[in-house]
Image (tube, rainbow, N blue to C red):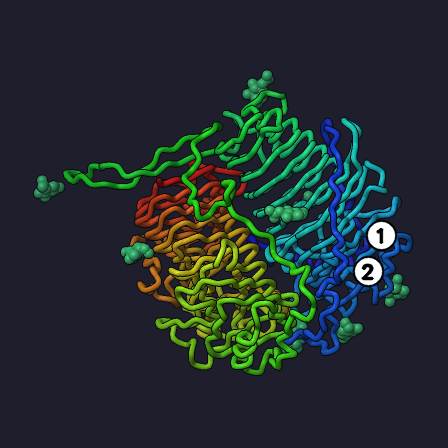
Amino acid sequence: MAHSRVLTSLIAFSLLLLLMLSGFATAEADYNDKHVPAFTHGHEKRANYGSGAPYWMSQIKRQGKVAYGANSSYILWRNVRDYGAKGDGITDDTDAINNATADGFRCGLGCDSSTTTPAIIYFPPGTYMVSAPLIMYYYTQFIGDANDLPTLKAFANFQGIGVLDSDKYLPFGFSWYTNQNNFYRQVRNLVIDITSLPKGRGACIHWQVAQATSLQNIVMNMVQGTPGDGNAQQGIFMDNGSGGWMEDLIFNGGGIGFFSGNQQFTSRNLTFNGCETAIYQNWDWIWNYKSLTINNCNIGLDMTQGGSVITTGSIVVQDGVFNNVNTGILTTFSSNSTPVAGGTLVVDNVDFTGTKNAIAYPNGTVIQPGGSVVSSFLQGRVYTAYEAQQQFGNLTCWEPTANSARIQQSVSPPPKSQSLLTASGTIYERSKPQYEGMPVASFISILDYGCKGDGVSDDTACVQAYFDSIATNQIAYIDHGAYVVTKTVQVPKNIRMVGEIWPLFMIQDIGLWSDKSNPKPAFRVGNPGDVGTVEMQDIVFETRGPAPGAIMVEWNLAGSTPGAAAMWDVHWRIGGTNGTLLQSDRCSKTPTVAHTANTACIGAFLLLHVTHSGSVYMANNWGWVADHELDLTDHNQIDIYNGRGVLIESQGPVWLYGTSFEHSMLYNYQIANAKEIYMGIIQSETAYMQDDPNALTPFPPNAAYSDPTFSNCFIATCYKTYGLRIFNSTYIFNYGAGLYSFFNNYDQGCLLTESCQENMVAVVESEGIYLYALTTKASTNQVTVDDVAIVPEAANVNGFGQTLAVFEYP
Ligand SMILES: *[C@@H]1O[C@H](CO)[C@@H](O)[C@H](O)[C@H]1NC(C)=O
Ligand SMILES: *[C@@H]1O[C@H](CO)[C@@H](O)[C@H](O)[C@H]1NC(C)=O
Ligand SMILES: *[C@@H]1O[C@H](CO)[C@@H](O)[C@H](O)[C@H]1NC(C)=O
Ligand SMILES: *[C@@H]1O[C@H](CO)[C@@H](O)[C@H](O)[C@H]1NC(C)=O
Ligand SMILES: *[C@@H]1O[C@H](CO)[C@@H](O)[C@H](O)[C@H]1NC(C)=O
Ligand SMILES: *[C@@H]1O[C@H](CO)[C@@H](O)[C@H](O)[C@H]1NC(C)=O
Ligand SMILES: *[C@@H]1O[C@H](CO)[C@@H](O)[C@H](O)[C@H]1NC(C)=O
Ligand SMILES: *[C@@H]1O[C@H](CO)[C@@H](O)[C@H](O)[C@H]1NC(C)=O
């Protein structure tokens, strides 16, 4: 989450109460039409689904329960047919579906957040007609039959912001949920059709979300137009947020396929067919568009918003193909555009063979012609670091330094490691499996096995025996609940695991995890040297109380093939929610007094450790040390002291797509003694309470884990969470980073001088480092090499943070 999230939400909350009292609450903000440029006609690609097999998800026994909620009869699984939806293509199903979603006093208007009323809204095959938005409450998953995608179809008289609405708008710029606080949502396996609407209006999805959210396998059908016809339909309308992840989406027709605005986001495998503009970037800090396919569109990506005062912070376009497109990317970045780093663009291995102009200005002037593959093109500030002889008095020594420039041109591509690539040279990627073809009998329920999941009982022995009982042709089904473990659980080297709307594995210290100088793993995936297949999805790891000696997940396993060792939508959440015993009643912030770390509010030693022998594929993972309360009604800011975020010591390959680690003390991301690592967007925030106490409290640096020692520090703001530290490593490829520092002991005064901390990215004893589209916020030095500051933020000002098109240290 971003700065002042809580403050904004409190103000919003009071206003909402006022609105409720005055009866204004149901007003709907107007959908904002955007002008659309000329259009190239294209043909519609139709999805070919319908294997006929029943989808296991529709048949599995539903017995998951909320462990730490107040309503023992709460219903978590809702089939829309059970609430009266017909899906017959005639009946208006809006109310029935909205009733299915709202049932049980869930977290709606005036709530802002809650983890105790989750719901899965399931759509069997059929065509569900709707006349108004389907409101998605907080912690909701909308899931369709993966074998026969249901269609949500808007009547011609449909009114509202989108067929699906993830954040209902209110008057005066307010909404149900603070946009950057809108966590834990999914939409999967749907066709959304607005072709009955007049072409002047309509959107399929209003998606205004933050971390731990995803869209997957959705086809959006819009009216196909003719050039200049005023088609204003949109597939996704996204004003803002702090996300997030989406994959495998198809946009057919429309004026703008994707109206896009968010702080940071990773998307992969988006296909646009016959949209006038495929993507209109309203604003962002950093976005990675991985594997775009754009067919028969006039414009592929329009990033001209703001004109010469550019509102797009930075964009990576990687491994895409543009077919029959007039202008691939439209930009206004030029020698005199502002801010100096605004509109940073990284194009990496994109096929513009079928494109007239790959990159051009709105006036038609071509920057990069089409007709070929662009292996690497950069616009923005670039730094190349190297070692040079320096004279200090009568001493000569080798010191890191860098050349820098502001460029807009093709450059040589980096030497990407083969282990990270497919045969065709793209970065390897893999959709989250949905096990469509598996019969329901293959899914073995952890509750049927006998584990309690009640949030209190010690399930250690049961969870271990259960994991060991799962055959390789079976899938471990973790019913919703909270499974408390008190000893290390060994995850076998071949197991597939699916959670029911993020069940909790709770790590409770009754002795094993007390010693912060002698950490022990909690969930240990494989033994060192093991090779196998572990697939995990939709699971949350938490601690129940402090566990200062716990390594929450230790990943030793190497995948038997690329992507065979993987985690999708698996998250860490330390404190801030019911059951964690690390909530605002005992861990509220105390910035007005100098203090040390409250021992009752310590989290874990480390959230994820990918060890020397491990390799892993990760997509959409959020390691959140809670900065505020989600369940207790004060939603207050809290101080939780967690040692470290993710430590990667792998020899490769590792793929991190759309990950975020926030608010640990020593670092959020560390890559040590490692090689051959790919990272799509990474995002982090420095712990808000620092420097009261600073990064060294309560976890002293531990050499066995290559911790930073901060021995290079002389000023207080130097002792702060590293966003990213790379130590003794090579061939590290990062395509998009947003590493932010918003506070000094909760005071935002440091933002006035953009100096909340001194250093954000440290490269130590490493080489072969390629960091593209790197944005830091309020860190005086963006990058240090061997403790020498060589990238001052002042030279790289962007609209929000400070941005480099690339930092490389070959
Ligand atoms: C959180 O847990 C407490 C104690 O079990 C319960 O009283 C409270 O209602 C829960 N809060 C929510 C939002 O469910
Ligand atoms: C508890 O949940 C059930 C089913 O979801 C709902 O009908 C009921 O109103 C809820 N009760 C309370 C007190 O929230
Ligand atoms: C939705 O719920 C309301 C209130 O319980 C009820 O009056 C209405 O009939 C329901 N609509 C449908 C279509 O079931
Ligand atoms: C989110 O977008 C809406 C609509 O454009 C705007 O009114 C609001 O100020 C934005 N909020 C933030 C925090 O950027
Ligand atoms: C891309 O998404 C489509 C569905 O939208 C899917 O059929 C295809 O397999 C996906 N490709 C990759 C590489 O994930
Ligand atoms: C088009 O716009 C660019 C950027 O503003 C400018 O450099 C160029 O001279 C313009 N070309 C023409 C023909 O006006
Ligand atoms: C280098 O300079 C220092 C004083 O600045 C002096 O004490 C020292 O002897 C000099 N060393 C050499 C090798 O000239
Ligand atoms: C650097 O990493 C390599 C490879 O993992 C390892 O063998 C070596 O011991 C490490 N060096 C240090 C100083 O940690």
Where is ligand 7, by quadrant?
top left
Q: Quadrant of the N terminus?
A: bottom right
How far from the left and from the top, in percent, is residue 140?
Answer: 70, 61
**Residue nearer the viewer, 206 or 559:** 559
Find residue 58 and report its image quarter: bottom right
Find residue 353 and report its image quarter: top right
Which residue is labeled 1 in the image? Answer: 130
Q: Classify 10 Å Cα crowding around label 1: few (below 14), some (14-19), many (20 and above).
A: many
How far from the left and from the top, in percent, is residue 673?
Answer: 34, 55
Q: Give the vertical position of 689 relative to 794 (above or below).
A: below
Instruction: Determine whether, in the image, residue 313 is placed left or right of residue 275.
Output: left
How far from the left and from the top, in percent, is residue 111?
Answer: 70, 63
Q: Count the labels in the image.
A: 2
Q: Quadrant of the C terminus?
A: top left
Q: Residue at x 43, y 63 (%)?
A: 609
Q: Residue at x 55, y 54 (%)?
A: 619
How far from the left and from the top, in percent, is residue 363?
Answer: 63, 21
Per the image, label 1 sits on a secondary structure element best described as strand
**Residue nearer the viewer, 387 or 43:** 43
Determine if residue 272 is in view: yes
Q: Classify 10 Å Cα crowding around label 2: few (below 14), some (14-19), many (20 and above).
A: many
Q: Which dot marks residue 97?
A: 2
Per the image, label 2 sits on a secondary structure element best described as helix
The answer to whether marks 2 and 1 mark residues whose Cβ atoms lie closer than 8 Å is: yes
Q: Residue at x 35, y 63 (%)?
A: 705
> Residue type at mark 1?
Val
